[in-house]
Amino acid sequence: AETTLGPSLRKELAGELPVNLLLTGALLDRMADQEPTTLAALRHALDRRIGCVVGGDYEERESTLLPLETVHADLRRGLSTYQKHLQLQPRVYGRRRQGLSPLVPQLMSRSGFEGVLGFTLDDGVFPSPDQCKTRWEGLSIDAIDALGRVPLDAAKAESFLDLPRKIGESMD
């Protein structure tokens, strides 16, 4: 988020633990303009292979209500922003807000993405799949690997304490 572009993010990126950043192209532009030291820290984390950027869109708009051409143009603008500032394209597409549609697998697989976060972290309600990882097929023959549930927070004790029960349920 815009509020975390400063010292707290730089501290996180300077550590030794892997960090995933869900980042829009617009936020990356803001980082380059307002927090160039954070952008340098992000580049350094990417070089050390402890940082990973997830994203794709330039702005998170209500893409389910927009024409396909507009959605595709926003995606291309976002990808060129990642290329400009980080010299890379995210390998996993994700967005914080609602906007997932049956067009996502086609757009993402044809744009070079390897996977998709098939959930959102803010507004929007989606069916909860039986499996965490799935092969998401859209309206065409295109399909892409997708995570269907929000991953567990490894920093929380309940994530580990609940593991035996979840393994037992999976075996059942």
Image (cartoon, helix red, strand yellow):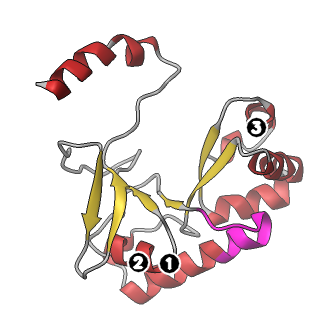
Task: For residue 118, say whether it is visible.
Answer: no
Marks 1 and 2 close (CB-CB < 8 Å): yes
The amino acid marked with disc number 2 is Leu
The picture quadrant where one finds residue 55 is bottom right
The front one of 95 and 47 is 47
For residue 107, the mark is: 2
In the picture of the structure, the residue carrying the numbered disc 1 is: 111
Q: Quadrant of the C terminus?
A: top left
The amino acid marked with disc number 1 is Ser
Residue 6, how many percent across, how many down? 79, 40
The front one of 121 and 15 is 15
In the picture of the structure, the residue carrying the numbered disc 3 is: 13
Work out how far the residue at label 1 is from the one at label 2, CA to CA, in angstroms. 6 Å
Q: Is residue 37 left or right of residue 99?
A: right
Marks 3 and 1 close (CB-CB < 8 Å): no
The magenta segment is 80-90
Does 36 lie within the magenta span? no
Q: Which callout, 3 or 1, points to the residue nearer the camera?
A: 1
Work out how far the residue at label 3 is from the one at label 1, CA to CA, in angstroms. 28 Å
The amino acid marked with disc number 3 is Leu
Outermost residue on the bottom side: it is 69
Q: What kind of element bears circle 2?
A: helix
The front one of 118 and 38 is 118
Q: What kind of element bears circle 3?
A: helix
